[in-house]
Amino acid sequence: MGRKRWFRAFVERLLMEQFGVTELMVDADGDVPFHRGSSACWVSVESRGPLGVRVWAVAAGGVRPTAAVLREVNDLNGCAALAKVVLEHGRVVVELRLPADQVTRRSLERACGHVLGLADDVGGLFTVYGGSTPFPVPSQAG
């Protein structure tokens, strides 16, 4: 088994343990989607360039790149220690990357929790600028 294949299998095994499942849902890009709160999240195994994992979430969509929005993104990145916030194609995305040699069950679990938490925290902020969260904000749900 090649190094890239082994690493993907390793990450998938960690995710199955984390989510308490025996089979993962994998999308057409090979990413593992999951969600909690108002954010849509994925874990991607990065095999182009250095091996690693990208944990990312769409915090809000339909956001226009105005000066005020870009200031918010810059301010968030100034405060965020581990993850970064980007505006790409009208979506506010929160992401955190782990190099392969730092991927353990605990680091992956913490990365998922950190990205989910930050995405949930900032998603509602961008609704002020005309965006919407992928899922209803829990306090607004039914």
Image: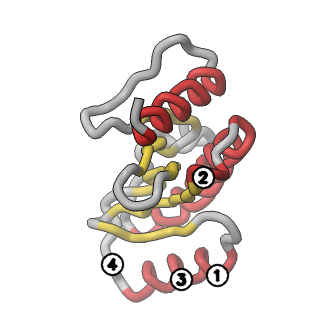
Q: Read off the residue under disc 3.
A: 74
Kind of residue sitting beneath label 4: Pro
Which quadrant would residue 18 be assigned to in this image? top right
Q: How is the image coloured?
A: secondary structure
Gap in Å between the C-alphas at discs 2 and 4?
22 Å
Element type at mark 4: loop
For mark 2, give the secondary structure.
helix
| Residue in the picture at 57% in, 50% down | 100
Q: Tell me if mark 2 has few (under 14), some (14-19) or many (20+) residues whose alpha carbon lies within 10 angstroms of its own.
A: many
Given residues 135 and 32, the one toward you in this image is: 32
**Disc 1 and disc 4 in contact, CB within 8 angstroms:** no
Sooner in the amino-acid sequence: mark 2 or mark 3: 3
Tag 2 or tag 1, which sits nearer the N-term? 1
Q: Is residue 62 left or right of residue 7?
A: left
Residue 87, located in which quarter of the rendered image? bottom left
Determine the CA span between mark 1 and mark 4. Answer: 18 Å
The residue positioned farthest toward the top in the image shown? 22
* Position of residue 128 measured from the top left corner of the image (x, y, whole percent): 47, 67
Q: CA distance from mark 3 to mark 4?
A: 12 Å
Q: Which residue is mark 1?
A: 78
Spatial CA span between label 2 and label 3: 17 Å
For the residues labelled 1 and 3, the Cα–Cα distance comes to 6 Å
Foreground tag (2 vs 3): 2
Question: In front: mark 3 or mark 4?
Answer: 3
Residue that badge 4 annotates: 65
Give residue 115's mark.
Answer: 2
Give the residue type that dot 1 points to.
Answer: Gly
Q: Are marks 3 and 4 in contact (CB under 8 Å)?
A: no
Q: Position of residue 113 (x, y in %)?
A: 67, 44
Q: Amino acid at mark 2?
A: Val
